[in-house]
Image: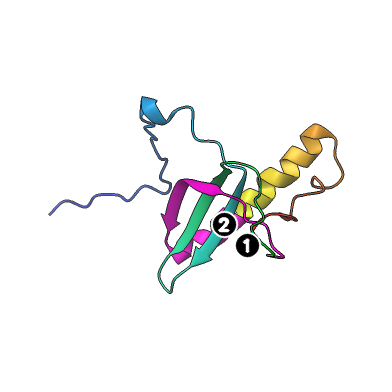
Amino acid sequence: MTDEATPAQIQFDVNLPSENETGVFADFANIWHTPNTFVLDFLSVKGPAVQTGDAEVARLPVKVAARVRIPPEQIFPLIEALTQQGQRWLRETGRSAPPENWAGQGMPD
């Protein structure tokens, strides 16, 4: 039997298909979960909000530009990475706080 050493660190060799290199645009994201999965829906607005009849709430047509499902074990590293990148962005842009609409105010639930 051979005694193979386990590497102390794993480095990912990421292969991004050329058709995905430009990515997709999203105006905002909606995040939800099941007992076994977190789902991130990245949404793009398709047109202006429309109020029908006497409705108190206008409906905003949106399209899911991309849906990403991740296991629960990955949500907290993702939150940490987003926080780090957000703080880095604030420093690089010279801002002291996130943009005013950072919490999705005025966006649909």
Magenta-highlighted residues: 56-79
Q: In which quarter of the image is the N terminus?
A: bottom left
Dot 2 crowding, Cα within 10 Å, few <14, some 14–19, many 20+: some
Please identify the residue farthest to the bottom as the structure is shown. 35
Quarter of image, res 88: top right
- Residue placed most toward the observer, 35 or 105: 105
Residue matched to label 1: 109
Q: Quadrant of the C terminus?
A: bottom right
Instruction: Check if mark 2's residue and mark 1's residue have beta carbons within 8 Å.
Output: yes
Instruction: Give, as a three-letter code, the residue at label 2.
Output: Asn
- At x 68%, y 65%, the residue is 55
Q: Is residue 53 left or right of residue 14?
A: right
Mark seen at residue 21: none
- At x 42%, y 40%, the residue is 11
Residue matched to label 2: 30
From the top left corner, tell me how far across and down residue 108 is, in percent: 64, 58
From the top left corner, tell me how far across and down residue 36 is, in percent: 40, 70
Q: Earlier in the sequence, mark 2 or mark 1?
A: 2
Please identify the residue farthest to the left as the structure is shown. 1
